[in-house]
């Protein structure tokens, strides 16, 4: 059960990193005026002069949506990491000096801390990329 959860935890952290990298790749693609006009027309947000989008005030932007998703994922992964640190601590206390159990407990704590570092780096990367895009 713990090994499966460790794999899930690592997969979640890697997904966040992949999202940060993909937002960099997608965000650097230039948007040309004709494509932007076509998109605006397609969603019904054409401005009166036809030169841009007439987006209502308070509408969510792509940047705010990405930040919200990354924040939610970071909170979930952070909570899971704290739970795993607690589980690792309990395993360490109840290991009774058995070398295999002590190693397993230390690995659980180590992987949880690595996950927290990855989540923190993902936050930094996403915010850096979004500042460069806008």
Image (cartoon, rainbow, N blue to C red):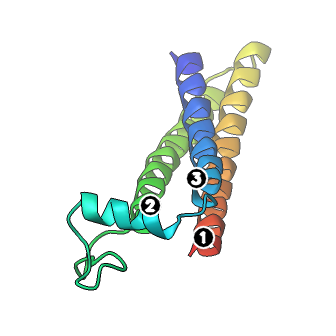
Q: Which of marks 2 and 3 is in front?
A: 2
Neighbour tally class for label 1: few under 14, some 14-19, many 20 plus, Cα within 10 Å: few
CA gap, disc 2 and disc 3? 15 Å
Are the residues tagged 1 and 3 within 8 Å (C-beta)? Answer: no
- In the image, 71 versus 112, the foreground residue is 71
Q: Regarding mark 3 in the picture, which secondary structure is present there? A: helix
Neighbour tally class for label 3: few under 14, some 14-19, many 20 plus, Cα within 10 Å: few
Whole-percent x, y for residue 84 in the image: 55, 36
The quarter of the picture where the C terminus appears is bottom right
Whole-percent x, y for residue 83 in the image: 49, 40
Residue 86 to residue 68: above or below: above
Q: Kindly identify which residue carries mark 2.
A: 35
- In the image, 28 versus 122, the foreground residue is 28
Q: Residue 133 carries which label?
A: 1
**Which residue occupies 20% across, 65% down?**
44
Q: Which of pointers 2 and 3 lies earlier in the amino acid sequence?
A: 3
Q: Regarding mark 1 in the picture, which secondary structure is present there? A: helix
Please, which residue is most extreme toward the right here? Answer: 99
**Which residue occupies 36% across, 80% down?**
51
Residue 66 to residue 107: above or below: below
**Which residue occupies 30% across, 78% down?**
50
Q: Kindly identify which residue carries mark 3.
A: 26
Q: Which of pointers 1 and 3 lies earlier in the amino acid sequence?
A: 3
Q: Regarding mark 2 in the picture, which secondary structure is present there? A: helix
Q: Which of pointers 1 and 2 lies earlier in the amino acid sequence?
A: 2
Give the mark count. Answer: 3
CA gap, disc 1 and disc 2? 18 Å
């Amino acid at each position: 059960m713990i090994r499966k959860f460790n794999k899930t935890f690592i997969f979640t952290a890697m997904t966040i990193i992949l999202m940060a990298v993909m937002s960099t790749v997608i965000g650097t693609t230039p948007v040309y005026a004709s494509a932007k006009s076509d998109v605006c027309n397609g969603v019904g947000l054409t401005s009166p002069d036809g030169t841009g989008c007439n987006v209502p005030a308070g509408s969510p932007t792509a940047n705010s949506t990405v930040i919200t998703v990354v924040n939610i994922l970071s909170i979930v992964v952070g909570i899971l990491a704290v739970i795993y640190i607690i589980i690792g601590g309990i395993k360490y206390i109840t290991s009774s000096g058995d070398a295999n159990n002590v190693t397993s407990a230390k690995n659980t704590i180590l992987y949880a801390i690595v996950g927290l570092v990855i989540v923190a780096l993902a936050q930094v990367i996403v915010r850096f990329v979004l500042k460069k895009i806008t």
